[in-house]
Amino acid sequence: MKLTVLGLGYLGTTHAVCMAALGHEVVGIDIDSARVAALSQGQLPFHEPGLPELLKRTLDAHSISFSTDFSQAAEFSHLHFLTVGTPQLPGSEAADLSQVWSAVDHLVPRLASGNHLLVGKSTVPVGTAEQLQQRVNSVRPPGVTVEVAWNPEFLREGHGVEDTLHPDRIVVGTQSGWAEQILRQVYAQPCADGAPVLGMDLATAELVKTAANSFLATKISFINAMAEICEATGADVQALAQALGSDPRIGPRYLHAGLGFGGGCLPKDIRAFMARAGELGTGKSLAFLREVDEINLRRRKRVIHLAEELLGNDLRGSTITVLGAAFKPDSDDVRDSPALAVAGELSLAGAQVKVYDPQANDTARRVSPTLSYAPDISSALAGADLVILATEWECFTQLDPVHAAAIVATPRMIDARNVLDARQWTAAGWQIRALGRSPQQSG
């Protein structure tokens, strides 16, 4: 099939390349000419395992191209995927939908006659698809019909290729059988591989993504709330999580205490969900998400307090190494990154902070240029009074504690992700603390 993808951020680029890999002909559109030029040369603007190889393969096969020209998109296809960003509005918890409206205003007036399908994939407040249909109807040319559908994405950064090519479910919110049939054709290969198609109305499809993110955020914050209780009582959050996760009604996934969630989706999505509920007069139904958000942010403060405990309540003049800048491993995304937030707070408290991330140093430097960034692990550890493991990259979880102890000034570690073997690190001479565990349990 011929299709276009409007918006070439993480979601749009991943979707466009994977659709081309499935055999479709794809044109990707973005207003950023530098990004379009880089993608046309096979250069990704972000780190995503497996995607560079797919991009090169699809470019070589001439199954994908990139452009800034909305007229080209309008002429190329009658099927358009909307993948623009919906960030948090400055000074508000609501979602900024300006990119959504702009993309429609640029594309729809240029469409050729006939029937077109505009498929939203961006995470938006419930009701946006209905508003979008009204806007489309007001700007479409004579002889053109445009139906809006919604097909939310469920990509995990670091696993975006797998999640697109082999999704665990395909949600399609449509207004007609025609639209659902087209989307079934788009995803014919994943469907053949066993991915179920869940057909529903527009509003429900919009809610699926925000509800899923809210549930996930709640589960993460729940175990981090339990970590706070464990720290106050001497209980062990790791053992608690194992026992809870053994209950089939609960399950072990994402029941892992640590520094909390970040990134460009969960934090802004739950806030936008709360804002939309308020607009609908149902704010009380999502009041619990306020505490979910606050629990998550408190974990960052707890790491700062642990650092103060280990360094005598005064961070001034101390050298602290923060291992990690990305919000999660296998990504260079530093949006709302807990690791980078902790590094920044330590610096403001007077510490000399060194940051190292195997992929996110450059993106972190653009966001927090005042921090110091080490070129490798050894340089990062050299002379450190305290090390904080803030992003669970494998190169950090597999560190040799004996070797690391010989590099630092003082072997002190805060395992903010609960991923290290505390006994092994203690045996190597480290004083180690972990979130949700007492000093005895940590070490």
Image (cartoon, rainbow, N blue to C red):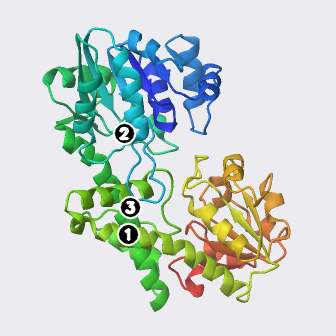
Tell me the residue at 28%/19% (across/down). Answer: 140
Percent x, y of residue 196 = 24, 35
- Which sits earlier in the primary sequence, circle 3 or circle 2? 2
The image quarter containing residue 385 is bottom right
Q: Amino acid at mark 2?
A: Glu
Q: Quadrant of the C terminus?
A: bottom right
Residue 186 visible in the current orientation: yes
Looking at numbered disc 3 in the image, what kind of residue is underneath it? Ala
Residue drawn at point x = 54 percent, y = 19 percent: 66
Residue 273, percent across and down?
32, 56
**Marks 1/2: CA distance?**
23 Å
Kindly identify which residue carries mark 1.
292
The residue that mark 3 highlights is: 217
Q: Residue 354 in the image: x percent, y percent? A: 77, 63
Q: Give residue 153's mark.
A: 2
Q: Is residue 277 above or below residue 105?
A: below
- Residue 404 percent coordinates (x, y): 78, 66
